Amino acid sequence: MSSHGGIGLELIAIAHLIKSIVDLNRQYKELTTMQTTDGKIYKVDLVTTDDNGRNIGFQKTEKGNYKVIADCAGLNSEQLKKQNNFVKQIRQRYSYNKVIEDLKKQGYIVAEEEKVQNNTIRLVARKWS
């Protein structure tokens, strides 16, 4: 039996967020402040840098999830696109890391993994009972 579907993503676990940033070969800092180009200062739990050299911060909300704080002031459309793509890569890696951990917790092993069109990852997991 196989199935597929879309996933609504809410960033909750900072450990998965850190692993996702490291998987993308990026540096990060924890528990810091982040100042954007327009002078605003944000308290963030994690900050990394995008391909434009701009800061991307992750701030924990009252609900317990993380929201993205992006320094996008003054970026042209191409730079904004690069920044958005970087955030999408983090979200995709986060989803991947979360799914892999959840599968392992449930006793599954990843039997196949393949990157297909549009950076989609196809996983086949098996569990022997």
Image: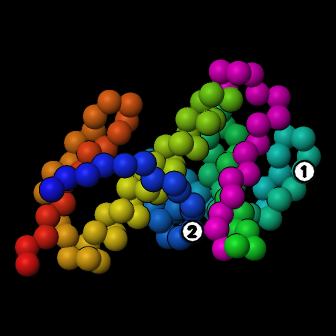
**Residue 106 locus on image (x, y percent):** 26, 77
Residue farthest right in this picture: 39
**Residue 65 locus on image (x, y percent):** 64, 68
| Marks 1 and 2, the one that precedes in the sequence | 2
Amino acid tagged 1: Lys
Q: Which residue is the site of mark 2?
A: 12
Tell me, for residue 40, which label it has, or none. Answer: 1
**Residue 13 locus on image (x, y percent):** 53, 70
- Mark 2, other Cα within 10 Å: few <14 / some 14–19 / many ≥20: some
Q: Is residue 14 above or below residue 95?
A: below
**In the foreground, 125 or 73:** 125
Residue 20 appears in the picture as rendered: no
- Please state if 128 lies on the left or on the right of 119 as rendered: left
> In percent of the image, x 19 and y 70: which residue is there?
108
Helix, strand or loop at mark 1: loop
Amino acid tagged 2: Ile
Q: Where, quadrant-wise, is the C terminus in this rendering?
A: bottom left
**Residue 58 locus on image (x, y percent):** 67, 59
CA gap, disc 1 to disc 2?
25 Å
Helix, strand or loop at mark 2: loop
> In percent of the image, x 37 and y 35: which residue is there?
119
> In percent of the image, x 34 and y 69: which residue is there?
101
Q: Nearer the viewer, mark 1 or mark 2?
A: 2
- Please state if 55 lies on the left or on the right of 36 as rendered: left
Q: Which residues are magenta?
A: 64-79
